[in-house]
Amino acid sequence: FYTFTTYMQKYLVNTAGIIGKYDETIDYSFEIFRKIYEINVFGTFLMMKYTLPIMLEQGKGAIVNFGSCSGMTGYTSEIGYGSSKWA
């Protein structure tokens, strides 16, 4: 993670995400599932957590979080990615 300082922070756009492994749920590795959540869900949260105080202090800013149609539709063999994008 990058270290934030108190410089002007106008925007935060969260677009990062990893798909992980294509596998059936019954065969899906918990380690891969966890890694997907660490990046797709927790990474988004942490970026907002550390950017928001700067924006509040300066009285302005905007945060945009991108999701995925996989979060609404779901696809076979993408249990980690799809569920993380719905979270």
Image (cartoon, rainbow, N blue to C red):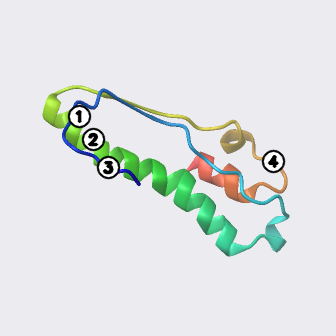
Mark 2 near mark 3, Cβ–Cβ under 8 Å? yes
Q: Secondary structure at mark 3?
A: helix
Q: CA distance from mark 4 to mark 2?
A: 33 Å
User: Which label's residue is closer to the chain start, 4 or 1?
Assistant: 1
Disc 4 designates what residue?
A: 75
Q: Amino acid at mark 3?
A: Lys
Seen in the image, is 26 located left or right of residue 4? right
Q: Residue at x 65, y 51 (%)?
A: 18
Between label 4 and label 3, give the one nearer the viewer.
3
Q: CA distance from mark 2 to mark 1?
A: 5 Å
Mark drawn on residue 52 = 2
Q: Residue at x 47, y 53 (%)?
A: 43
| Residue 68 image position (x, y, % from top left) | 65, 37
Question: Neighbour class for label 3 at 10 Å: few (<14), some, many (≥20)?
Answer: few
Q: Amino acid at mark 1?
A: Met
Q: Secondary structure at mark 1?
A: helix
Q: Is residue 16 above or below residue 27?
A: above
Q: CA distance from mark 4 to mark 1?
A: 37 Å
User: Which label's residue is closer to the chain start, 1 or 3?
Assistant: 3
Question: Neighbour class for label 2 at 10 Å: few (<14), some, many (≥20)?
Answer: some
Q: Amino acid at mark 2?
A: Leu
User: Which label's residue is closer to the chain start, 4 or 2?
Assistant: 2
Q: Amino acid at mark 4?
A: Tyr
| Residue 77 image position (x, y, % from top left) | 83, 57
